Image (cartoon, rainbow, N blue to C red):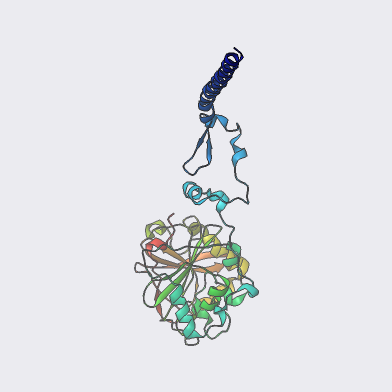
Amino acid sequence: MNYLYSAFSSRRFAFLLALLFILSLTACQRVQPTISSAVEPSASGSALVEPSTFPSNTSDLAPEASQTPSSSESSAISPNPSSTKEPPKKRLPDHLAGSTQTLPYAELQTELRALAVQDPSVKLRIPVYEGSDILYQTKHSPLSFYTGLDSGQYRGLYNTRPYVRYLLAFYPTEAIRQRDADTFYFVYDTDDGIRLFVFYSEKNGDGEYDGIQTPVGYPILISKMLSHTDFAGIQAGDSAEKVRAIDPVMSVYEDMFFNVYKWNSIAAESYRKENNPIATIHYLRDGLLKIEYDIVDDNRLVVTNLIFDPNYDLTNLYGETYNYRILPQDLPER
């Protein structure tokens, strides 16, 4: 009898254990869906949080400055121009300038051709410099662009022009276009909305510095694209204010003439006698316009002559003609 009671007790105990095991399995199955609905593994194995679990202030999720987004994130996010825009550049100090300033001429030619963009389909990466530094400064003479002046007037004078070696060293730019076999131009933007072009040519008539060492003609400044018809109302005797009303770049020329060069009526007469009258150059959609001036009462520019060429040719004080044509894709869009 005792044996039967013991066996029955053992069976009851085993039955209770089995019942408890079944109940525990049922409880786990009921809990599992609740857990999986809150967190799901992503393809990469990390957990993706449902939108309902995001904090109310989404700015708290912005990465810190030291964090770098993954390649998948960076390709999906378009940078904000206002936050990624670099400050305008300035002339490099002497200790940072490149070694191109001391290159022999043969090596300089090779260097320039290697840097220049020859494929017209390639868009130039134009740097932005401070206008006050690149347009107005004349302190560092070989690096001055001499706005409004024909570089030919400095022949025979040392350290008077923006030699190509100095531009490469002190005003570096990737925007160097080889327009044809003989002609190059450097391109710069300024923080005040001016696009600057400086031309170099193997056909440079400067006997002191042959070829591409020195610039040819005038630097070209463009504030906005205009046409010859925009200047149809300008004639001899008109004031600079009338020209400025058409082309805003005129204000840069006036600043240079009066506040930097300190020109007056005597200077204007002297330049005219040297076949190099005071002038502004306007690059237009349909040609090149040169407007010549006198200075009246030492402080007013008055138009004396207008020269327009649909082929973008301009003759300097030595009678040498240079072509200023710029590829359309390098011009400002405005």
Q: Position of residue 304 (x, y in %)?
A: 47, 68
User: Up-down: is 78 above or below 214?
Assistant: above
> Residue, x 57% and y 33% (percent of image)?
54
Q: Where is residue 182 in the image (x, y as percent from the top left)?
A: 39, 78
Q: Where is residue 276 in the image (x, y as percent from the top left)?
A: 49, 76
Q: Which residue ends up furthest to the top in the rendered image?
A: 1
Decide which of 197, 19 is in the foreground and name it: 19
Decide which of 319, 238 is in the foreground and name it: 319
Q: Which residue ends up furthest to the bottom in the rendered image?
A: 207
Q: Where is residue 213 in the image (x, y as percent from the top left)?
A: 49, 81
Is residue 48 in view? yes
Quadrant showing the C terminus:
bottom left
Decide which of 104, 202 is in the foreground and name it: 104
> Residue, x 50% and y 50% (percent of image)?
74
Q: Is residue 208 left or right of residue 118?
A: right
Q: Is residue 96 left or right of residue 309?
A: right
Quadrant showing the N terminus:
top right
Is residue 317 in view? no
> Residue, x 57% and y 78% (percent of image)?
99
